[in-house]
């Protein structure tokens, strides 16, 4: 397994095992994490999506995801890539597929407001099924 997939697997494991996920029926999840210039997580939000397409706003606690996120941020930096301001982590529970998208410049990307909440929820839907 590549180190990239291993680090993404660590993030997925934290999400799946989070107490905040208890009792939530989901097949896919998107979690957005904002980090500071040193790679430390300082904001998190996300949505789960069930097999019918319904969503629930939920995310693990920030302290739960800090370590695996920081390890991934540092690994990307060591690999010669620029540190990200935000990471969007997506996971499909059935297919076990993962995806990560990064924002390096726009701190407002994926920002939820009353005017865009429906479009952001749709935009963040992973669609990583089989």
Image (cartoon, grey):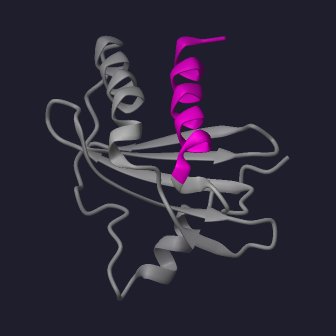
Q: Is residue 86 magenta?
A: no
- Give the magenta range: 1-19
Q: Residue at x 81, y 65 (%)?
A: 51
Q: Residue at x 36, y 88 (%)?
A: 115
The spot of residue 127 in percent (x, y) is: 70, 57
The spot of residue 114 in percent (x, y) is: 35, 87
Q: Residue at x 66, y 63 (%)?
A: 24
Q: Of 21 and 80, which appears nearest the observer?
A: 21
Q: Is residue 1 above or below residue 84?
A: above
Looking at the figure, which quarter contains the N terminus?
top right
Q: Is residue 10 magenta?
A: yes
Q: Which residue reaches farthest left?
A: 37
Q: Is residue 3 above or below residue 20?
A: above
Residue 39, image quadrant: top left
Q: Residue at x 14, y 35 (%)?
A: 37
Left or right: 54, with 117 as reference point: right
Residue 41, image quadrant: top left
Q: How many numbered marks are there?
A: 0
Q: Give the prevailing secondary structure in the magenta stretch.
A: helix
The spot of residue 97 in percent (x, y) is: 71, 38
Q: Of 100 and 44, which appears nearest the observer?
A: 44
């Amino acid at each position: 397994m590549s180190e990239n997939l291993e680090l993404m697997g660590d993030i997925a494991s934290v999400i799946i095992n989070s107490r905040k996920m208890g009792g939530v029926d989901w097949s896919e999840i998107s979690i957005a994490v904002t980090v500071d210039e040193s790679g430390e997580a300082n904001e998190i939000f996300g949505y789960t999506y069930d097999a019918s397409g319904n969503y629930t706003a939920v995310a693990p606690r920030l302290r739960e995801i800090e370590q695996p996120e920081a390890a991934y941020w540092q690994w990307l930096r060591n690999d010669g890539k620029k540190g990200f301001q935000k990471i969007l982590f997506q996971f499909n529970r059935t297919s076990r597929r993962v995806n990560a998208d990064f924002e390096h410049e726009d701190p407002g990307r994926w920002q939820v407001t009353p005017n865009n909440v429906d479009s952001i929820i749709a935009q963040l839907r992973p669609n990583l099924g089989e």
